[in-house]
Image (cartoon, rainbow, N blue to C red):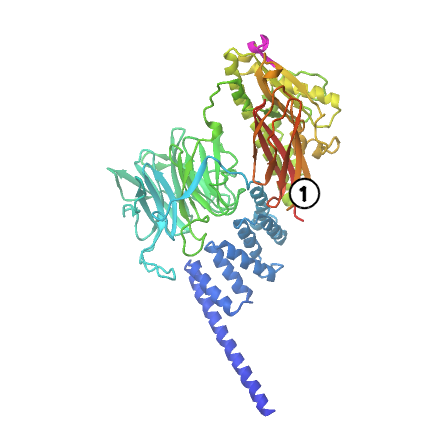
Amino acid sequence: MKRQNIHIFFTLFLFFISNSIVSQSTKQFVKYANELIAEGNYYGASIYYKKALNEDSSDIGIIYNYANSLKNYNNYELAEYYFQKVTNKDKGGRIFKDATLWLASMQKFNKHYKESIKSWKKVKSLYKNNKKSYEYLKAKKEINSCVFAIRSTNDTLKNCIVENFGNTINTAASEFSGKLINDKLEFSSLRADSVNTMLEIFEPNYKVEIYNSSNSDTWTNPNPIDSIINNSNFHNANGTYSENRELYIFSRCDSLSNCKLYYSKIVNNKFTKPIELPEKINSKASNTTHPNISQFNNKQLLFFSSNRKGGEGSLDIWYSEILDGPTFGKAVNAGKKINSPDPEITPFFNSQTGKLYFSSTWHNGFGGFDVFSSTFENNSFSNPKNLLKPINSSWNDIYFNTTKDQLKGVISSNRKGIIYEKGPTCCNDLWEITFFDQIENQEITIKTLDDINKYLPVTLYFHNDRPGPRSNDTVVKLNYLTSYDDYKTLQETYRNEYSKGLNDSKESEAKLDIDDFFKHYVDKGVDDLNLFTSLLLDELEKGEKIELTVKGFASPLAKSDYNVNLTKRRISSLINYLLEYDKQQFKKYITNGNLIFNKIPFGEYTSKKVVSDDYYDQRNSIYNRAAALERRIEIQTARKANYTDSNFAELNVEISTHDFGKVNKGETVKHTFRVQNTGSKELNIRKIISSCGCTIADFNYNPIAPGEYGKVTVELNTVNLIGKQVNSITILSDAFPTTKRLVLTAEIFNN
């Protein structure tokens, strides 16, 4: 018994010694990590926090600090995993209240938008007692932003490509603020010659410097610019030249949060000694950086970022006029449409277009910093627009700018594809943007009437019971553009009415749904009409006699006979538009019969059954997107007025939209459209194009005889979709019209 007690004693003794050793090593690892955090070395700190975690995996403080260090060197995937651990352990946020906010942010970086929405809702709940707090307002904004990201997943700029500059320019360190100037690339970089396998720097003057590289067939190895700019006692970055190449302004910093702007004159191709800009620009106790010199309205302007007093939050966009000397005018804040509680940084003003480009983490985006554009009009900046993919990604996209001819651009980004050692999204690389002319902006050559039909149908949309409300008239005096202008003023009303009574993400989805409708349908209709009108006039001036087929549609809010007259009024507004066009050139062709109209007022006969006809349910009968899609007229065909019935095939789809309603995520749903040849010549469908990979169209491609029907079956795969969806297919054929767009809508729910 005694021997057994001794055995237990020694076992416990060894256990306590072992625990003591573990405790000591854990504390030492945490100490090392904290020291590295103080130095700004988050990657090094993460290594020691991980060692500490290996010793004690249950310590929530170490887990939080490890997650934080991962976040700070942009290891978003691991950071999400460990912030999730923290929030699982600390469900009420009593210990680390901000962990849920960082979890939501990391989820957005990783394109886990649905999960991010749930986390942002938790952030709102945690901070609901102070609805003016940054955290509450940020959560509310980010719910909208995640919905935008989901809805914009398939929205891509088709006129550009983005490619990494490669390892001649980029390193495993950070490259940023790149600018293409003629055949040179100037940029800033934090690169070092002395780096060991633990990624520790041994260079005595480890500072950001400004470099340039030349390009003939390939980029040359970069070299630092003049040492009078690259003062080794400071970080020097973000250089910008005046248009006449006589002035150079750049950032000089003793830390990332303490920068000032300096200028140097360029005399005989050499920099003069830099001079700090006056207090008008470098306000006391503020961080001032990211300069950009631009010309606008015969003025030379300096744009920059600063957290000076009078701003909206963190770093804001400011601008000032550059006068002779140089001296500088008063610094002006770019305003609340641009600036927010979050940082707005890296401004670039395009002198040719009058557009300001900048990066922000506040406005609706895909994750991290996105690039936005805003037009300067009426002495202020317009609401920012996201530049979309591939310029933006779910990671940080900053320092966007273009060449003067706007054929090339540069962006700094830590998107996947960078050159790295610490992690696949640790650091910024420079990326080259190549722009191409969009197809719709190319010069259009019209040789035959068939070529005009390639741009049909033109679809024009109307507000409920407009024009000529509460009337049985079949004609009106106003033209379509007046009706369009009135309709646009109601966009905010549509947003509010359609989203009324919904909460959080559903409200945001509904508002985005309306914005998409006005942008991709109402506005596009006017753009198409402008193009079609000029093409039509060219043909008439050649002596052609042309018949336009115009069909009308209406939502079922009123009786069918009323709607027939309403659609006639809508067709009348189109004819008025043509009569009043430019210098009234169409008037003589309409009067002499060279332009005639085949009017087909369908009324509600083809409207979808899912659209409400209940006046007291105005959300669904008036402001619902499905109802708005019904209130339209279509210019469907343009053909020579003396065509005989044997000369053409005509493509007709009686109901060209289908709503699947509510669908569980992951389901595949199908709908069959009946396509009829209402002409007198055999109809051949040549191709069917889907708007996204989620829709597949099936058709046997057999010719359709006159009067006969074909079937186009469309399959919608919802596995990668969530929320309200609008997708389409486009049929290309040898008929009139040569193209026909069929629209599919659905609302996707999680099971």
Answer with left or right where residue 487 lies relative to residue 614: left
Q: Nearer the viewer, residue 486 or 170?
A: 170
Q: Residue 289's spot in the image, x, y percent?
A: 40, 45
User: Residue at image x 58%, y 61%?
Assistant: 95
**Quarter holding the N terminus?**
bottom right
**Does 77 sit above or below residue 274?**
below
User: Residue at image x 45%, y 37%?
Assistant: 160
Asked if residue 158 lies in the magenta stretch, the reply is: no
* Total marks in image: 1
- Let me know if residue 582 appears in the view: no
> Which element carries disc 1, helix, strand or loop?
strand
Answer with left or right where residue 279 lies relative to residue 599: left
Q: Nearer the viewer, residue 283 or 631?
A: 631
- Let me know if residue 501 appears in the view: yes
Identify the residue under disc 1.
663
Which of the 4 image quarters holds residue 152? Answer: top right
Q: Residue 722's spot in the image, x, y percent?
A: 62, 44
Q: Residue 107's spot in the image, x, y percent?
A: 55, 51
User: Residue at image x 44%, y 60%?
Assistant: 37
**Does 708 sit above or below residue 363?**
above
Answer with left or right where residue 435 lies relative to residue 584: left
- Residue type, numbered disc 1: Val
Which of the 4 image quarters holds residue 727? Answer: top right
Instruction: Estimate how packed mark 1 is, as few (under 14), some (14 to 19) or many (20 or more) residues with alpha carbons within 10 Å.
Output: some
Q: Residue furthest left?
A: 268
Q: Residue 374's spot in the image, x, y percent?
A: 48, 35
Question: What residue span does the magenta drawing correspond to?
Answer: 588-596
